[in-house]
Image (spheres, rainbow, N blue to C red):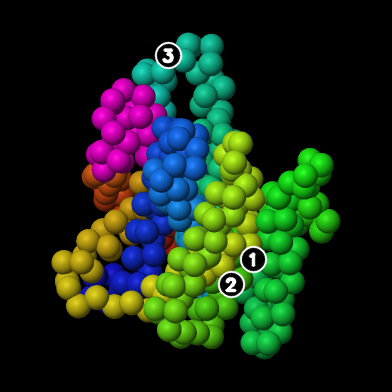
Amino acid sequence: MNAETRNTGLDIIRTAAIIFVMITHMLNYTGLMHINLRSFQWIVYDIIHYASMLCVPLFLLLTGFLHAKRRISFRHYASILPIIVSYLSVCAITAPIILHLFGLNDSSIGAFILSIFNFQFGYSWYVEMYLSLFLVIPFLNLLADNLMQKQMTVFIALLIFSTMLPALLIGFKLPNGLTLDVFPDFFENNYVITYYMIGSYIARFNPAPSRFRCLLFSIGILGAESVVCFLLSAQQYAWEPFNKNAALTHMLAAVGLFLALYTVQLKSRFLQRLFMEISVCSFEMYLISYCTDRILFTYLTLPAWQILCINFILTFCTARLIHSFTAPFGRYVKNILLEKIKLNP
């Protein structure tokens, strides 16, 4: 699909999400949030931190939006092959570099290789989560197909109640040290399904609220998070209330940003192409960034934001090169499998 026929708004969202990924990892590697508590610099980093936490919610909303029409079929399950090919390819390239630079001995190589296949290597937790979600996507769509708009709204509200409200409340500590663990949090990790269903809802019903109001709403939510964090951080950094992907406030901010951007169409072909190029290899960028994060933030002594810019350029160039090989090969493997299935029904 070329830049003229793509949905530029979705490319912008995916670009923002991968930038947020790299920012949140930068903050973790540099420890910028744990110095000069409540200073002006800390306040700025705190706002940036909460904005960067929207990365996973945005990726999951995109998944729900783009896969809302998937049905139970071999074609759906075969379409995961390019993702697996990219994952294994990036691991094969970056794992030896990590082994060499960070001094793992031969006795740990076996465990290191095993970590690739049990999704413990680098940032592969997201791959494991995505594969699990991918398996049930057709069935989630089957459920959504049989719900009217009001029914789906109620279902999403109940999902939010059971997967996101507990994660928000438990982050707040009472004066006696207890937490607001007053709602059952058994389904908290199912927040991925909540985000998926919200993205699917947007794809099905195409809500079109004011972009400006949605953007203002998201900024307001992020500002409110920062104000609360500031007030609670008198003695130490109070990161707990909004530090989970399942936090209700993150969901609200992410949905607002998604609604503000998903229908955007740019007239500039250069910008269309730029966002498309970043978007198509964002998965590989995410995987490669584990290697570049460790190397650059370990060996470079430049200011953090300069390292971030270098990291983004290096990661993008490497990911785009890898994607140019893995994507065609993954599609080739998928098509071969589908042909064999047709020949042997």
Determine contact: label 1, label 2, CB under 8 Å. Answer: yes
State which quarter of the image contains the C terminus: bottom right
Crowding around mark 3 (Cα neighbors within 10 Å: few <14, some 14 to 19, many 20+) is few
Q: Determine which residue is flagged by label 2.
A: 198
Q: Earlier in the sequence, mark 2 or mark 3?
A: 3
Is label 2 or label 3 in front? 2
Is residue 323 depicted above or below 124 in this figure?
A: below
Mark 1–mark 3 distance (CA, rounded to whole Å): 41 Å
Residue at 59 percent across and 36 percent down: it is: 236
Give yes or no for residue 113 being in the magenta stretch.
no
Tell me the amino acid under the disc marked 3. Answer: Gly
User: Neighbour class for label 1 at 10 Å: few (<14), some, many (≥20)?
Assistant: many
Residue at image mark 1? 194
Task: Tell me, for residue 103, which label it has, or none.
Answer: 3
Q: Is residue 343 visible?
A: no
Indicate the position of residue 272 as horizontal and vertical percent values. 23, 69
Which of label 1 and label 3 is nearer to you? 1
Q: Nearer the viewer, residue 333 or 287?
A: 287
Amino acid type of the residue tagged 2 in the rendering: Ile
SS assignment at label 1: helix
* Magenta-drawn segment: 286-311
Which quarter of the picture shows residue 211? bottom left
Among numbered discs 1 and 3, the one appearing first in the sequence: 3
Q: Would residue 288 be counted in the magenta stretch? A: yes
